Image (spheres, rainbow, N blue to C red):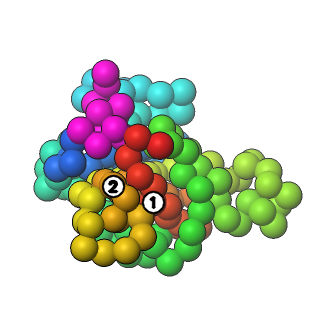
Amino acid sequence: MTDREQFLAGERPDDVAFFLHEAAVSGIDALAERGERTAEGVVLVVDGEAGRQAFQSATGIDPMAFAREAMGTEGRVDRDLTGGTCPDSEGDGGDREGHEARLIFAFAEAQNEDVEGLYAEGDVVHAYVACECGQRYSEKWLTGE
């Protein structure tokens, strides 16, 4: 099982995962040596604080500020953390051209039975996306979905 599969299954709750599209960062080949190469970029799974620092180093974006900005707009994030459906693509007839995910930052939050909703059902993945068009959006789901 890859690091990404373990993260998405809820087996690495202290880690963060992030996807970097090859058009969004330079040195993608060097990053691929530390992560998992995908068709259009690389996914890295790194210990929490080190992962946040690595994301900021690679992108120049503070991951927590990025998350705060993206959480205001709901979109669809691919469950493999390599893409998504930008809410602005609906105005383009659902066409993904010009709406590819350039960056995805994700972390998991442990189940909390003291609250209602999704968090009471199990561990939750929070994912935040920067789209090629400039839109930032997010989605959360139960691990293992």
For the point 33% across and 65% down, the residue is 120
Mark 1 and mark 2: Cα distance apart in space: 12 Å
Q: Is residue 66 left or right of residue 102?
A: left
Q: Where's the N terminus, which quadrant?
A: top left
User: Disc 1 designates what residue?
Assistant: 140
Task: Tell me where the magenta segment starts and ends, as one range.
Answer: 1-11
Decide: is 72 above or below 112: below
Residue lying furthest right: 93
For the point 41% across and 52% down, the residue is 142
Image x and y of residue 76, in percent: 59, 56
Image x and y of residue 132, in percent: 60, 55
Q: Is residue 141 magenta?
A: no
Disc tally is 2
For the point 54% across and 27% down, the residue is 39
Image x and y of residue 105, in percent: 37, 54
Q: Secondary structure at mark 1?
A: strand
Q: Amino acid at mark 1?
A: Lys
Front residue (pair 137, 100) = 137
Q: Is residue 51 left or right of residue 77?
A: left
User: Disc 2 designates what residue?
Assistant: 122
| Residue 131 appears in view | yes
Q: For the residue carrying disc 2, how many other residues have a C-alpha within 10 Å: few (<14), some (14-19), or many (20+)? A: some
Pointer 1 with pointer 2, Cβ within 8 A: no
Q: Is residue 31 left or right of residue 144?
A: left
Numbered badge on residue 117:
none
Image x and y of residue 91, in percent: 81, 66
Q: For the residue carrying disc 1, how many other residues have a C-alpha within 10 Å: few (<14), some (14-19), or many (20+)? A: many
